[in-house]
Image (cartoon, grey):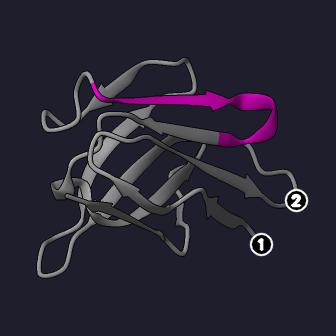
Amino acid sequence: QVQVAESGGGLVQAGGSLRLSCAASGSFFAANAMGWYRQAPGKQRELVAGITIGGSTNYADSVKGRFTISRANAKNTVYLQMDSLKPEDTAVYYCRVSQIGGNFYWGQGTQVTVSS
C-alpha cells in the first residue's frame, strides 16, 4: 500500500515564503512523475507544478518565477518552495505521485493561507 504524506503548510503574510514537502512510501514503491496541485474554495483543483523522474519541470503561469519544484529520488520526496506568496495562492495544496505503470496517488492535502 502506498502512502503519500504532505507537510509544511501554514499561515503566512503576503510576500512571505513557505516550503512544502511530500514523501511517498510503500513496499517496492518507486515514484515516477510527481507534482503539486491546489484547490481554492469554489474552484477546481489545478496543477501548480510538476517534475519528471529526470528532473524536467513545468509550472502554472500564475506561479512561474515564484515557485520552485524539486525532488529527491532516493527518498521518493518532492518539494515546493513558494516565494513572494500572494493572497490568491491561498488553497489546499495536494501532492500527487505517479508510479511507473500508470497508477497515481494523492496526499491528504495541506492548507496554505496567505494574508494580505
Q: Which residue reaches farthest bottom?
A: 42
- In what quadrant of the picture does the C terminus appear? bottom left
Tag 2–tag 1 contact (CB < 8 Å) = yes
**Dot 1 alpha-carbon crowd within 10 angstroms: few under 14, some 14 to 19, many 20 or more:** few
Q: Position of residue 37 (x, y in %)?
A: 34, 55
Q: Position of residue 81 (x, y in %)?
A: 48, 35
Q: Residue at x 55, y 68 (%)?
A: 107
**Side of 90 where 96 appears, left or right:** right
The residue that mark 2 highlights is 27
Q: Which residues are magenta?
A: 66-77
Q: Nearer the viewer, residue 38 or 89?
A: 89
Q: CA distance from mark 2 to mark 1?
A: 7 Å
Q: Is-magenta flag for residue 70?
A: yes
Q: Tell me which label, 2 or 1, sits earlier in the chain.
A: 1
The residue that mark 1 highlights is 1
> Does dot 2 land on a helix, a strand or a loop?
loop
Quarter of the view holding residue 75: top right
Quarter of the view holding residue 77: top right
Q: Which residue reaches farthest right?
A: 27
Count of marks placed on residues: 2
- In what quadrant of the picture does the N terminus appear? bottom right
Q: Position of residue 38 (x, y in %)?
A: 31, 61
Task: Look at label 1 and name its amino acid.
Answer: Gln
Q: Is-magenta flag for residue 69?
A: yes
**Dot 2 alpha-carbon crowd within 10 angstroms: few under 14, some 14 to 19, many 20 or more:** few
In the displayed structure, 67 sits above or below 89; it is: above
Quarter of the view holding residue 105: bottom right
Q: Residue at x 29, y 35 (%)?
A: 84
**Side of 102 where 28 appears, left or right:** right
> Does dot 1 land on a helix, a strand or a loop?
loop
